[in-house]
Amino acid sequence: MQIRQQGRQTWLFDGPLGIIGQAAVAGPREGQGPLAADFDQIFDNLRLKQDSFEKSEQKMGERAARAAIAKAGLTPDEVDVFFAGDLINQITPSGFTARSIGIPFFGLFSACSTATEALSLASLCVASGAARRALALASSHTCTAERQFRYPNEYGSQKPPYSQVTATAAGAALVAAEPAAVKVSAVTVGRVCDERISDPFQMGAAMAPAFADTVQAHFRERGVDVDYYDLVLSGDLGRVGQAIAQDLLQLQGLSLAQEQLADCGLLLYGGDKRVFSGGSGCGCAAAVGFGHIYRRISQGELRRVLLCATGALLSPVANQQKESIPAICHAVALERGE
Amino acid sequence: MAGKPQAAAWYQVIVQRHTPPKKLARNCLTAFIGGGALCALAQAALFSLMHFADMAEKDASTVVLTGVIFLTALCTGLGIYDHAGQKLGAGLAVPISGFANSVAASMMEHRSEGYVLGSGCNSFKLAGAVVVFGIISAFGVALILMFLGKI
């Protein structure tokens, strides 16, 4: 197992770096969507029998983490390091999950790009020999995120048609230096991009430049052809952000075919109008990437996918202080293993 | 205080091209009809109380306002109000129902942090601004009227 830096932002993994276990869990609305069959567990209500939504989110993440480990035929004791993040202040659901499963833990905050940040770092740990097995987890819950970033859940405000809705979902992936159906072949670390969008409902427009920047860097530094990937999957740009991202890529001279592009926030809900432009949240890219995409690669429907989770690094305080919305995107290349 | 940052013109063009417009005319119309209907119902209730229950206008309006506040809080608690708010927008936000909803929603939201420090402390999280600036502007108006010798 070897890891190589290529260019400034890209890491290449030579040798088998397999996803030996994975799981995706989802809330009621996501469970009614087109990806229902790809979820290990679907919860029929948002509470999960907990007395706060924060606890519900923690339970959801923990279920995903435990399911991923169990599917690899392992116990938490056999996993050496755990990377996790969510959207809540001080990432408490991740911390509480780490407390309960007892794996040495790094907490992450990278907004909705946490799924690929966690998977990148888990891959790095295993490839460098720092850990035998590393677990990546990201979760989000619509009721905890909406209240933190927007208004109280029951407040009757009118959302604009370009807004997005936080997904109630979690995804976990367990990485080890052994052959598996799906392997991690490369990572491109994102830079923070800010095109000075300041409307917190315009997340897609805020994040699209970060997506384009990372995808450009990945193709340039890895030196692969434009048709190398079956799918270049953005995290959660939504319908609006995805259209903007396509324009940006073309403007910068990277002409990906229409059918090569997809967005986790759109895949998760199909055409559900109740989520406006599409889904968002850490759990969106995690559940779609580690659930749906993993399944399609392992079954041979797809060969290579560049999973590019996008995150908006805003806070309500920064927004009220009239800061614009910086965004980031980390890309992980998932390929069919041997 | 500095203004909000602006995206570069070229990026604004791309963003505008793909951003569905807010349906301003439709939103205004549904707000007018929805809010108008709410107010007409309340007015009908007021007249009914005055005529059939023989109440003075002042007493009847207190009863009607309390009723609207109660019904709003109930609908908020039942999870209906936020969906209606998405449809009717300002029609539900401008009347006193909007105020009641913002208090009830904030209290529900923070219930898990306790009755006092959670629901209690956060109840005027959104409505507080209305109270504060309402009092300040009332004071300003009263001051002007006083100088004009009307009070």
Image: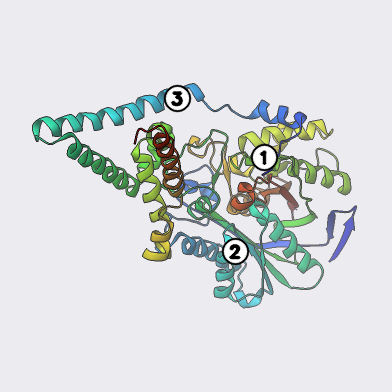
**Observer-nearest residue: A313 or A59?**
A313
User: CA gap, disc 3 to disc 2?
Assistant: 40 Å
Q: Secondary structure at mark 2?
A: helix
Identify the subunit bearing mark 3.
Answer: B
Report the side of A121 relative to A77 (left or right): right
Image quadrant holding the C terminus of chain A, namely bottom right
Q: Work out whether residue B18 can be spotted.
A: yes
Residue under label 3, please give it: B28
Mark 1 or 3 closer to N-term? 1
Look at the image and name its color scheme.
rainbow
Give the crowd class for mark 1: few <14, some 14-19, many >=20 residues within 10 Å.
some
Q: Residue at x 48, y 53 (%)?
A: A143
Per the rendering, the mark at residue A91 is 2
Q: Residue B94 location, x and y as percent?
A: 40, 35
Report the side of A305 relative to B58 (left or right): right
In this rendering, is residue A202 above or below A43? above
Residue under label 1, please give it: B4
User: CA gap, disc 2 to disc 1?
Assistant: 28 Å
Q: Work out whether residue A291 can be spotted.
A: no
